[in-house]
């Protein structure tokens, strides 16, 4: 947990850990083997060495700093009672900057004590000025509640911290508005509650000294772009009341946190990134499951959507799930308390079941020491599992990232991470579960069949070096800007002075709102014309979500966002929900609902679509001789036209069935590159192989983009063609899958050579012969991964990289 982490990271180990010495692990003879010994035994197990890299992350002694002279004695004493006798260097540096009035983002590791960095200046100010107030924003209610406990425990006179969110009883709300000086909330409440009710909050906002934005790296993509404007609306209301609060942000480590924080707040922000907190040593191994013998092609034992494994693709590597299960069994057999992180719930169950089976084969009964952990457990059940693991009754636990969200389990001897969890922040959060005070621990990242995982296990510098992955957002997205300006206009008429605050595109968006009859222009500004407020969802997606309803019972199983509904919920689709299989009877697009029944067929379904793309405008481009690199607006038209049914056990295609679904349009932002046919021919790409070469390069490029920007490959689409009508050349497009763009294509354009270099290396370094899911195959290909040419994709990217300036 990141909150109040200064105290536990600083001087007091987790209380449970002190009471659970290694000797209580009764399966092994006393304390387990050292991480180095354990790793040696694990890698000696099979033929060939699956370990591509071992990083010794050394233990680090903290660098303490003196309390700032402005920190009142009372506050220092309160922190000391909580275990922090002095701040770490980075905490003091960030606190000093903030106290001097600079906007600051502290971007350091998990449990490095980011809370103290903002609590110190904020609380010192509240103590010095009995009228000042602080607003704290967290992405989740749980985090805000956690932080409230930490601030309340300091027992400072007159601060009266309080959470203000959807759960706050009406009766308490007025008291909080009037009396609390440290209000903890979330962006949704700020957007839906506080800003529309600014008149009632005027006393609080008028005296606002600090705005704290915790876990600010979670505000990315479309959601982040919305939050950026909610913060501009907050700054606008504060300015109306004469306040100019200082923004203090806390972020996970990422590439260029100052720029991301600047985009989020619209203010110049200074970054503090040097982590001076102490940490335990970890031996971190990168593990690539071996290639299978050519003809063994073993099918994945579980359905694809449930596990994230791709059963439809020809599997050439041993699956990460199997490999993780074996590793878990081996560490448990050594008496080592191990936590395995698996991306899906079903996957966690498969890992635990396989590990239990192998252990029982070796020593009957030993399998009982392994369990699966999934979300949805009652609090008592969770506590019981935690207790069992900490005391060694349980030695192995396979879990989804449910543990990341509020379960207090640290101090394990080994952590296995089955598949890169998507961001370095999550990776370190998971690895951070290993290691007890003064004791070394082992962490293993097991690569999945995926271009990004493959790249990472062969490029340890991308994990252990300076981060390049940045949090991106695009406040200029017109699909975000217009509704946010409408909200702002309701709060107070917009004036020309507001244009600079809301940034690029604000004037155009206002003109469109006027043309649409939503705003009226008067001499004093632009006024909202309607009685009711605009309904704006901060997580707004393309199209309303589709409800998934079980016909027999009328039970709502869940929702699927509009953008994916045609793919996942077409009639006949096999839909997996929490490990249970359903078949779709009907997709009613008018009502936004899909009717399903439970059925466990032995096939999976795979939708095919046809996509067309036209260039609307070019924002920016690089002319690099035979190669062109572009950023601009595009219109994407797509239609899901058919689906295949394939046997789960063998991947064999049973049949292809047509679908009758409407086309959908998406205006978004894309990055694309073109190559001259001559340059391709000169590089040895035959004309007939150009489509397969571009297609393969496109898949891998999409797979590697999460290295540069925190996004999911499902946030992004692509299209490649040997001749495009708008570019008149062989072209690869990669576009944001959200209306108006979310910043991903823009980041790809800005880091094009690094991005495509990583893509090229990922393909070239994959040991397969003709292409596999680890390099050029994609689980979401609308063309069934056909055509693809792995060697020619490398030639294409070599031509691009040879010409593109760094
Ligand atoms: Zn491959
Ligand atoms: Zn494809």
Image (tube, grey):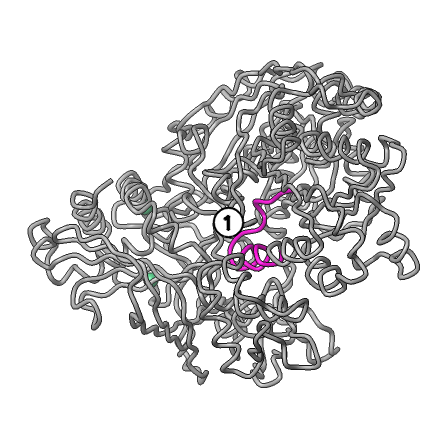
- Pick the residue in front: 270 or 301: 270
- Pick the residue in front: 205 or 449: 205
x and y, in percent, of residue 330 in the image = 58, 29
Whether residue 269 appears in magenta in the rendering, the answer is no
Report crowding for label 1: few under 14, some 14 to 19, many 20 or more residues within 10 A (C-alpha): many
Q: Quadrant of residue 63?
A: top right
Q: Quadrant of the C terminus?
A: top left
x and y, in percent, of residue 491 in the image = 68, 67
The residue lying at 29 percent from left, 70 percent from top is 615
Q: Is residue 365 visible?
A: no
Q: Is residue 460 visible?
A: yes
Q: Is residue 435 left or right of residue 81?
A: left
Q: Is residue 137 left or right of residue 770?
A: right
The residue lying at 61 percent from left, 40 percent from top is 249
x and y, in percent, of residue 93 in the image = 60, 25
Q: Is residue 733 left or right of residue 177?
A: left
Q: Which residue is mark 1?
A: 263
Q: Which stretch did the figure color magenta?
A: 214-230
Magenta stretch, main secondary structure class? helix
Whether residue 218 appears in magenta in the rendering, the answer is yes
Secondary structure at badge 1 equals helix
The residue lying at 10 percent from left, 57 percent from top is 686
The residue lying at 75 percent from left, 23 percent from top is 71
The answer to whether residue 571 is above or below residue 403 is below
Q: Residue furthest front?
A: 523
- Pick the residue in front: 177 or 354: 177
């Amino acid at each position: 947990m990141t909150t109040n982490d200064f105290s536990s990271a600083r001087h007091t180990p987790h209380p449970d850990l002190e009471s659970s010495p290694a000797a209580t692990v009764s399966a092994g003879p006393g304390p387990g083997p050292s991480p180095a010994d354990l790793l040696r035994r694990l890698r000696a197990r099979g033929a060939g060495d699956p370990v591509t890299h071992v990083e010794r992350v050394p233990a680090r002694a903290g660098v303490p700093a003196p309390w700032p002279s402005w920190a009142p004695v009372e506050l220092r004493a309160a922190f000391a009672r909580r275990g922090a006798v002095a701040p770490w260097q980075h905490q003091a540096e960030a606190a000093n900057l903030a106290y001097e009035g600079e906007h600051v983002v502290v971007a350091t590791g998990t449990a490095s004590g980011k809370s103290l960095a903002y609590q110190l200046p904020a609380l010192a100010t509240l103590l010095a000025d009995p009228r000042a107030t602080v607003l704290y924003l967290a992405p989740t209610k749980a985090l805000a509640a956690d932080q409230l406990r930490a601030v309340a425990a300091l027992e400072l006179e007159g601060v009266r911290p309080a959470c203000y969110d959807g759960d706050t009883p009406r009766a308490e709300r007025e008291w909080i508005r009037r009396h609390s000086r440290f209000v903890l909330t979330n962006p949704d409440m700020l957007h839906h509650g506080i800003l529309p009710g600014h008149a009632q909050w005027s006393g609080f906002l008028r005296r606002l000294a600090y705005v704290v934005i915790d876990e600010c790296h979670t505000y990315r993509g479309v959601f982040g772009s919305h939050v950026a404007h909610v913060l501009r609306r907050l700054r606008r209301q504060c300015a109306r009341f004469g306040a100019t609060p200082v923004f203090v942000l806390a972020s996970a480590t990422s590439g260029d946190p100052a720029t991301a924080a600047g985009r989020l707040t619209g203010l110049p922000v200074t970054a503090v990134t040097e982590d001076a907190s102490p940490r335990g040593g970890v031996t971190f191994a990168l593990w690539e499951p071996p290639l299978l013998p050519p003809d063994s092609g073993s099918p994945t034992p579980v359905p694809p959507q449930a596990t994230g494994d791709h059963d439809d693709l020809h599997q050439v590597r041993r699956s990460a799930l199997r490999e993780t299960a074996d590793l878990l069994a081996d560490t448990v057999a050594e008496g080592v308390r191990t936590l395995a992180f698996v991306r899906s719930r079903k996957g966690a169950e498969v890992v635990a079941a396989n590990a239990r089976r192998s252990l029982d084969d070796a020593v009957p009964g030993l399998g009982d020491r392994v369990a699966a952990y999934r979300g949805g457990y009652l609090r008592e059940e969770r506590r019981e599992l935690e207790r069992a693991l900490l005391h060694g009754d349980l030695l192995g636990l396979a879990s989804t990232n449910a543990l990341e969200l509020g379960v207090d389990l640290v101090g394990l001897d080994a952590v296995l991470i089955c598949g890169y969890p998507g961001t370095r922040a999550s990776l370190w959060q998971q690895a951070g579960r290993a290691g007890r005070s003064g004791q070394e621990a082992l962490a293993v990242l097991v690569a999945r069949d995926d271009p990004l995982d493959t790249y990472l296990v062969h490029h340890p510098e991308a994990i252990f070096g300076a981060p390049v992955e940045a949090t991106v957002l695009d406040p200029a997205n017109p699909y975000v800007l217009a509704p946010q300006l409408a909200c702002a206009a309701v709060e107070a008429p917009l004036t020309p002075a507001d244009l600079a605050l809301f940034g690029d595109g604000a004037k155009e968006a206002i003109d469109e709102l006027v043309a649409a009859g939503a705003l009226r222009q008067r001499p004093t500004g632009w006024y909202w014309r309607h009685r009711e407020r605009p309904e704006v969802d901060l997580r707004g997606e393309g199209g309303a979500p589709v409800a998934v309803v079980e016909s027999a019972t009328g039970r709502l199983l869940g929702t699927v966002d509009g953008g994916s509904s045609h793919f996942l919920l077409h009639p006949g689709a096999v839909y997996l929900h929490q490990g249970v299989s359903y078949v779709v009877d009907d997709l009613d697009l008018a009502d936004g609902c899909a009717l399903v029944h439970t059925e466990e067929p032995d096939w999976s379904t795979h939708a095919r679509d046809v996509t067309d793309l036209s260039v609307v405008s070019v924002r920016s481009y690089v002319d690099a001789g035979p190669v062109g690199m572009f950023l601009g607006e595009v219109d994407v038209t797509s239609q899901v036209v058919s689906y295949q049914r394939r046997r789960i056990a063998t991947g064999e295609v049973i049949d292809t069935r047509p679908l009758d679904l409407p086309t959908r349009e998406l205006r978004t932002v894309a990055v694309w590159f073109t190559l001259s046919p001559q340059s391709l021919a000169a590089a040895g790409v035959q004309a007939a192989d150009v489509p397969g070469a571009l297609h393969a390069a496109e898949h891998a490029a999409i797979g590697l983009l999460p290295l540069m920007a925190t996004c999911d490959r499902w946030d992004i689409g692509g299209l490649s063609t040997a001749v495009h009508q708008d570019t008149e050349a062989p072209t690869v497009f990669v576009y944001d899958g959200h209306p108006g763009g979310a910043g991903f294509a823009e980041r790809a354009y800005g880091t094009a050579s690094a991005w495509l270099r990583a893509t090229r290396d990922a393909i070239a370094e994959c040991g397969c012969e003709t292409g596999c899911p680890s390099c050029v195959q994609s689980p979401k290909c609308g063309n069934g991964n056909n055509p693809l040419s792995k060697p020619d994709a490398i030639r294409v990217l070599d031509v691009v990289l040879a010409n593109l300036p760094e």
